[in-house]
């Protein structure tokens, strides 16, 4: 972390816990005046420490309460085949996260759907249409113990 000090870290901590906090309130919590806080935030955005601001939504209320982790093994690993797989995965809105992993599988997908019937429909009509998938292993989340969007600083 170059060019970042304890005040910057305090600002980042406050913003990742509440990105709606106004500059005056934020300045008060870290004992600075608003102008330097504003300038620091703009620098942190410019330097890429802050990449975007988002609203976190309630999955249950929006009928996306079932979380499934799906491990995927590809049939072949040619560069263009992997690129096509990634392009297809990115296009599916049910897949909210995708990781290229090491081990028995090549990718881990985090999928949000309403229920088991929705997941079955997703697998049969969307996931199964993607070329080069060798096999999959679905893991169904029974309960969420810890979910955080904050990075430890």
Image (cartoon, rainbow, N blue to C red):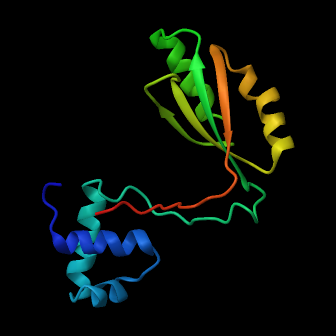
Number of numbered callouts drawn: 0
Residue 43 in the image, given as x and y percentages of width and height: 23, 64
The residue at 82%/35% (across/down) is 120
Which residue occupies the foreground of this view, 33 or 29?
29
Residue 117's x, y, as percent? 86, 42
- The residue drawn where x is 15% and y is 68% is 5
Expressed as whole percent of the image width and height from the top left, the position of residue 23 reads 35, 83
Taking 10 as reference, is 110 left or right? right
The foreground one among 95 and 54 is 95
**Residue displayed at 58% across by 34% down:** 90
Residue 77 in the figure: left or right of residue 145? left
Residue 72: image quadrant is: top right
Q: Quadrant of residue 1?
A: bottom left
Q: Is residue 8 above or below residue 120?
A: below
In which quarter of the view is residue 137 placed? top right
- For this orientation, the residue located farthest to the right is 117
Which of the two residues, 20 or 74, is positioned nearer the viewer here?
A: 74
Q: Residue at x 43, y 81 (%)?
A: 21
Coordinates of residue 94 in the picture (x, y in percent)? 69, 42
The quadrant in which the C terminus is found is bottom left
């Amino acid at each position: 972390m170059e060019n970042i000090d304890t005040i910057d870290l305090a600002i980042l901590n406050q913003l990742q816990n509440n990105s709606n906090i106004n500059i005056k309130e934020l300045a008060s919590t870290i004992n600075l005046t608003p102008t330097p806080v504003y300038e620091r935030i703009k620098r942190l955005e410019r330097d890429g420490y802050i990449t975007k601001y988002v609203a976190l939504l309630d999955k249950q209320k929006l009928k996306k309460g079932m979380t499934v982790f799906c491990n995927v093994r590809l049939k072949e690993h040619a560069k263009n085949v992997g690129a096509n797989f990634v392009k297809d995965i990115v296009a599916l809105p049910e897949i909210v996260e995708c990781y290229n992993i090491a081990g028995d599988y090549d990718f881990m997908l985090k999928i949000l759907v309403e229920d088991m019937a929705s997941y079955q429909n997703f697998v049969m009509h969307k996931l199964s249409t993607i070329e080069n998938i060798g096999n999959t292993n679905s893991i169904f989340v029974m309960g969420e113990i810890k979910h955080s969007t904050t990075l430890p600083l």
